[in-house]
Image: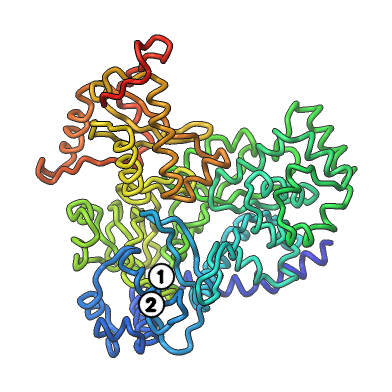
């Protein structure tokens, strides 16, 4: 096995090291590289309808590009993306460009985003992972000392749906898993077909069935909630898991959730009996009273997932499960593409991926003053090398996948430079987008759900605020001043919360998925002391701006803010004189 692992690791690591060396060397001239990246993309797509419409057929420079192309969010891109989904690639791309799929993710409105994945953008995505991976593996030498140690990496389904032209829509991770060479795939525990499994517990179960028999080197998952979900399932369902490992069977409740294609792909591995492993796991249970990866994966080298923004809160639980294992952030990466490549453990900061995409930056205060993306259309932007350490910015992306000055609404902080390339730390998903477990709940969705519910309940209260709250699982609280709901009891508030949650499910499928898989708690309504909104307004104005500029938010991605409010407990339905009054 050691020889096979070395055969797997050597060719791929040699290529990855060459990519990483070039990337780090190019940081010295990151400004020049960025200009070349933009010129190459403009030249490639000069014959597209987009280029003709914006006067870019001969333009290759940033100054002209800025003047002629407005800053836009997804909605501004959607008309061209719709044509590409129909098979009309000339909407955005020049001749010879191949679209392989559409990366699908929740949008800020009710419509999921579908981002074109071209051959070039996929190559950039894979190259970014290789650069990240070799930096992480070389920092933990035992990952490679005997060849590449086994890796548990969770991938999604790249064929969730299909466009009218027949192209798949789904998770780009599923496509990259499919494209791995058979030799490299031996190092990865999970078969690519597991991405087709929709039930999260079943996916975690299959991850454990695949990884427990192996001397695991690392777990890679964007969301730390996924990592914790896997190891908690091992402890919660230990009896079922051990019985299936011993007998080479699959418990009916898990088997029912595995698609036929996945069952066929895993039939041999799931039928294997691991009786020695089960005896070892039973011994660990008897000795420690619980089943933890610190015991059953003793040679785990590091963990890899997001650590910035709200994701950092999950890391508090890691020592209990894994001991003092290092954590490497996987970088700011989304369906739109990779934005940063971290090169050290225990930091959310990474080097801007300046060699694959073109980036511009908007100072945070510019966006806050503007209010809407339409107000930002011709706003002044900064290039990557012009950022100031300690300042906060919104990212704009131009990519090989057809994004043009795309406002992704990610807030980053510049924490330094490597050469002329900035080190960026992810802070949050924009001023009015919250994401505790990857749900990307937007203020637009909250307002739409609350407005519909208010009409249904004939409610007259107008002012409210939704905040994320940490817990196990985390969730959201909708705050309303108690005077606005005078007479409401706990039963009424529960009905109101369920109605709003029901609408949020329809507006945001990822939010619905997190509720169904218990990664998010249901929405809860909290009554707060009268005068709370005035106090919040005063605190926010003290940080700058004027009363005329102040806009009352309906959603803020601030985990600490809830604790600043005084919560008023509503009467229980039993003590309330009436549970049917709705004078609100």
235 with respect to 392 (left or right): right
Q: Nearer the viewer, residue 203 or 470?
A: 203
Q: Which of 255 and 407 is in front in this view?
A: 255
Tell me the CA gap for discs 1 and 2.
Answer: 7 Å
315 lies above or below 349: above
Q: Which residue is drawn at 53% across and 48% down?
A: 223
Q: Which residue is drawn at 41% across and 30% down?
A: 524
Crowding near the residue tagged with mark 2, few <14, some 14–19, many ≥20 C-alpha atoms within 10 Å: some
Q: Where is residue 69 drawn, in percent x and y?
A: 25, 75
476 lies above or below 378: above
Q: Residue at x 71, y 71 (%)?
A: 10
Residue, disc 2: 33
Q: Residue at x 33, y 51 (%)?
A: 430
User: How many discs appear?
Assistant: 2
564 with respect to 354 (left or right): left
Residue, disc 1: 354
318 lies above or below 248: above
**Upstream in sequence: badge 1 or badge 2:** 2
Q: Where is residue 312 drawn, in percent x and y?
A: 47, 42
Residue 575, located in which quarter of the rendered image? top left
Q: Residue 257 carries which label?
A: none
SS for tag 1?
loop
Q: Which of 225 and 198 is in front in this view?
A: 198
Q: In which quarter of the image is the N terminus?
A: bottom right
Is residue 145 among the parts visible in the rendering? no
Is residue 533 among the parts visible in the rendering? yes
SS for tag 2?
helix
């Amino acid at each position: 096995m050691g020889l096979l692992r070395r055969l797997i690791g050597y060719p791929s690591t040699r290529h990855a090291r060459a990519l990483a060396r070039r990337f780090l060397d190019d940081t010295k001239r990151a400004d020049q590289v960025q200009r070349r990246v933009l010129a190459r993309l403009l030249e490639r797509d000069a014959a597209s309808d987009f280029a003709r419409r914006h006067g870019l057929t001969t333009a290759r420079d940033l100054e002209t590009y800025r003047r002629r192309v407005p800053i836009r969010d997804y909605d501004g891109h959607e008309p061209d993306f719709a044509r590409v989904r129909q098979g009309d690639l000339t909407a955005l791309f020049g001749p010879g460009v191949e679209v392989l799929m559409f990366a699908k993710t929740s949008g800020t409105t009710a419509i999921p985003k579908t981002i074109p994945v071209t051959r070039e953008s996929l190559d950039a995505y894979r190259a970014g992972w290789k650069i990240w991976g070799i930096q992480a593996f070389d920092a933990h030498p035992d990952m490679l000392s005997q060849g590449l140690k086994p890796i548990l990496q969770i991938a999604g389904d790249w064929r969730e749906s299909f466009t009218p032209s027949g192209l798949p829509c789904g998770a780009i991770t599923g496509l990259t898993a499919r494209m791995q060479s058979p030799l490299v795939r031996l190092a990865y525990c999970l078969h690519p077909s597991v991405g087709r499994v929709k039930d999260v517990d079943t996916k975690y179960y299959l991850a454990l069935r695949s990884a427990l028999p192996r001397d695991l080197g690392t777990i890679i998952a964007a969301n730390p909630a996924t990592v914790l979900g896997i190891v908690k399932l091992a402890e919660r369902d230990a009896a079922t898991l051990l019985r299936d490992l011993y007998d080479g069977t699959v418990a009916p409740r898990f088997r029912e959730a595995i698609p036929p294609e996945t069952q066929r792909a895993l039939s041999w591995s799931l039928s294997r009996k691991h009786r020695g492993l089960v005896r070892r796991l039973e011994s660990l249970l008897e000795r420690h009273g619980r089943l933890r990866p610190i015991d059953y994966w003793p040679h785990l080298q590091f963990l890899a997932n997001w650590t910035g923004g709200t994701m950092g809160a999950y890391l508090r639980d890691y020592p209990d499960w894994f001991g003092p294992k290092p954590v490497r952030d996987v970088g700011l990466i989304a369906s739109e593409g990779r934005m940063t490549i971290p090169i050290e453990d225990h930091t959310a900061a990474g080097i801007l991926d300046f060699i694959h995409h073109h980036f511009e930056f908007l100072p945070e205060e510019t966006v806050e003053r503007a209010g809407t993306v339409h107000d930002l259309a011709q706003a002044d932007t900064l290039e990557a090398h012009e950022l100031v350490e300690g300042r906060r910015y919104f990212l704009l992306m131009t990519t090989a996948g057809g994004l043009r000055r795309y406002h992704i609404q990610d807030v980053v902080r510049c924490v330094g430079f490597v050469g002329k390339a900035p080190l960026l730390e992810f802070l949050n998903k924009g001023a009015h987008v919250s994401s505790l477990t990857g749900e990307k709940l937007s203020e637009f969705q909250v307002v739409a759900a609350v407005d519909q519910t208010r009409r249904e309940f004939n409610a007259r209260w107008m002012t409210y605020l939704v905040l994320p709250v940490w817990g196990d699982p985390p969730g959201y609280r909708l705050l309303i001043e108690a005077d606005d709901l005078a007479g409401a009891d706990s039963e009424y508030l529960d009905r109101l919360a369920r109605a709003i949650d029901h609408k949020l499910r329809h507006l945001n499928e990822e939010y619905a998925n997190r509720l169904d898989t218990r990664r998010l708690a249901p929405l809860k309504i909290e009554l707060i002391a009268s005068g709370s909104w005035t106090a919040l307004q005063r605190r926010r104005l003290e940080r700058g701006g004027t009363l005329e500029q102040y806009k009352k938010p309906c959603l803020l991605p601030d985990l600490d803010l809830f604790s600043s409010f005084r919560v008023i407990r509503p009467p229980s339905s039993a003590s309330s004189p009436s549970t049917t009054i709705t004078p609100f």
